[in-house]
Image: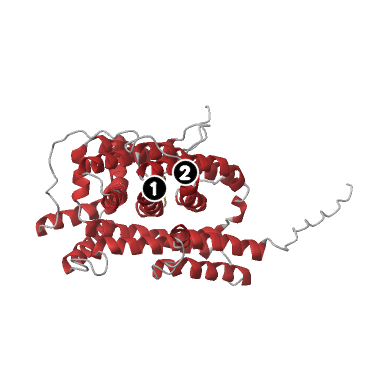
């Protein structure tokens, strides 16, 4: 008999049935769809865009997110880590895009995004040499900060901003906690595929409750226009202003640090051995490619999202082909306007309730990573404590750097980035500076037989 020498398929490369791929892919998209919608409408409100331009920018954002997700999930000639990533517009890049556009015009902001995409590729060889300074103690601390920051953002989705109309209305809290309750009940009571879909089912349950309470926005639910096509260069030819682009370029370095932590975390979540020199570099190249395309389509930087790691942990579904299907669904949202409007109608409180669960799971991953670190060690204790102090300050005390220049305040106010950079610097000071390399013990001599 011939032995079966075929290698077992790893979870990240598992080919699931199409029905499961579609359902699990939709789960990722529905959990994450609030990010591109919020980003576009924030940009449109701040810059006074028309409703037609806003719809085209929403279509463009979904398009670039979908293409970027496909690149990260499937890989493309050295770009994309071949890991189950979803790509989304980052919160800080959107704010920087708006700031540049307000000061210099949208064409300059688009040019800044394109220049930053090129800058990614130029600076990557140098960053590659620094990857060894991001061990588990740094990445675990960063994941904790990511979770705290995202949970805070989810809370804002649920209750709104202090002082705004309808802030912390009981109905909003009811929708959020009901969504969490539906999610927990589905996870506890359902088995198999349905149990793995608990996040999606919780979101659907919260949406149905919103319909019953009259809180689901149906004013924009129309069939026409049926197709929405994004426009290339919606603001005209980009203007390239190096000085105006500096804030985004500086954030690009921060984004590289975040991409490193996300690649390490998602590799652990899917039980894939990590080659930092290969996988992290591929992730960052994917970010650069998507951001270049985003600049041509009128969006800000499109970068890998760590939020979907929580979905993977919660469901146990680790195949990268699931997120590849998510990318195809995002392309569908980009072209089919009624689908985008349906997603837009889901109340923010429902999305926030789902996000609270998903983002908190990201925090448990950080705790699990730090659990493997000896925190009784003097150096490790200071690495984690100082990084958390620096990172949590701007998250918990908004505006702490408000008297600095706008660009510097935006950089320092990114608690996740500053905490991760602080952890890397502290780790370097305690564990690299002045440390002598260990001398291997001499092997005992063997007597001749």
> Circles 1 and 2: CB distance less than 8 Å?
yes
Q: Which mark is residue 43?
A: none
Q: Is residue 261 left or right of residue 235?
A: right
The x, y position of residue 175, in whole percent, is: 19, 62
Q: Residues within 10 Å of mark 1 (few under 14, many from 20)?
A: some
Q: In terms of depth relative to the viewer, which is nearer, 117 or 275? A: 117
Q: Quadrant of residue 439?
A: bottom right
Q: Is residue 105 left or right of residue 120?
A: left
**Residue at which label 2 appears:** 241
Total labels: the figure holds 2
Q: Which residue is at a point 22% across and 42% down the rendered structure image?
A: 340
Identify the residue at the far front of this view. Answer: 104
- Disc 2 is placed on an element classified as loop
Q: In terms of depth relative to the viewer, which is nearer, 398 or 281? A: 398
Identify the residue at the far right of this view. Answer: 448
Q: Residues within 10 Å of mark 2 (few under 14, many from 20)?
A: some
- The mark nearer the N terminus, 1 or 2, is 1
The x, y position of residue 253, in whole percent, is: 52, 51
Q: In terms of depth relative to the viewer, which is nearer, 256 or 298? A: 298
Q: Which mark is residue 104?
A: 1
The x, y position of residue 182, in whole percent, is: 22, 59
The x, y position of residue 136, in whole percent, is: 55, 58
Q: Quadrant of residue 339?
A: top left
- Disc 1 is placed on an element classified as helix
Residue 258 visible to the viewer: yes
Q: Which residue is at a point 22% across and 47% down the rendered structure image?
A: 343
């Amino acid at each position: 008999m011939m032995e079966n020498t075929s290698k077992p398929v790893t979870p990240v490369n598992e080919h699931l049935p199409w029905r499961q791929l579609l359902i699990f892919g939709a789960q990722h998209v529905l959990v994450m769809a609030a990010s591109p919608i919020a980003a576009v409408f924030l940009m449109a409100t701040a810059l006074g865009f028309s409703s037609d331009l806003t719809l085209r920018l929403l279509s463009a954002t979904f398009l670039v997110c979908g293409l970027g997700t496909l690149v990260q999930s499937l890989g493309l000639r050295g770009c994309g880590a071949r890991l189950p990533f979803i790509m989304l517009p980052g919160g800080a890049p959107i704010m920087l895009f708006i700031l540049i556009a307000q000061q210099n015009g949208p064409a300059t902001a688009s040019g800044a995004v394109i220049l930053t995409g090129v800058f990614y590729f130029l600076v990557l060889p140098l960053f590659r040499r620094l990857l060894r300074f991001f061990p588990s103690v740094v990445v675990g601390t960063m994941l904790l900060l990511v979770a705290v920051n995202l949970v805070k953002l989810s809370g804002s989705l649920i209750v709104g901003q202090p002082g705004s109309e309808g802030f912390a209305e009981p109905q909003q809290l009811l929708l959020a906690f009901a969504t969490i309750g539906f999610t927990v009940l589905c996870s506890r009571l359902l088995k198999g595929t349905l149990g793995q879909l608990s996040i999606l089912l919780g979101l659907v349950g919260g949406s149905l409750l919103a319909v019953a309470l009259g809180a689901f926005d149906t004013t924009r639910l129309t069939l026409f226009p049926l197709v929405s096509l994004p426009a290339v260069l919606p603001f005209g030819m980009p203007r390239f202003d190096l000085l105006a682009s500096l804030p985004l370029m500086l954030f690009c370095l921060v984004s590289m640090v975040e991409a490193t932590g996300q690649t390490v975390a998602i590799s652990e979540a899917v039980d894939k051995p990590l080659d930092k020199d290969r996988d992290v570099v591929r992730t960052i190249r994917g970010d650069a490619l998507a951001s270049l395309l985003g600049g041509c389509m009128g969006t800000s930087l499109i970068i890998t999202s760590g939020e979907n790691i929580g979905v993977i942990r919660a469901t146990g579904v680790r195949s990268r082909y699931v997120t590849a299907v998510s990318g195809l669904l995002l392309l569908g949202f980009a072209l089919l306007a009624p689908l985008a409007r349906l997603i837009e109608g889901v109340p923010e409180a429902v999305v926030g309730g789902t996000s609270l669960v998903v983002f908190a799971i990201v925090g448990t991953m950080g705790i699990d990573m730090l659990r493997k670190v000896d925190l009784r060690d003097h150096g490790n204790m200071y690495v984690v404590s100082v990084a958390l102090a620096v990172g949590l300050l701007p998250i918990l005390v908004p505006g702490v750097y408000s008297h600095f220049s706008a660009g510097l305040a935006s950089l320092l106010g990114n608690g996740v980035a500053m905490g991760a950079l602080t952890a890397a610097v502290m780790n370097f000071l305690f564990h690299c500076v002045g440390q002598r390399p260990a001398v291997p013990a001499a092997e005992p001599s063997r007597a001749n037989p």
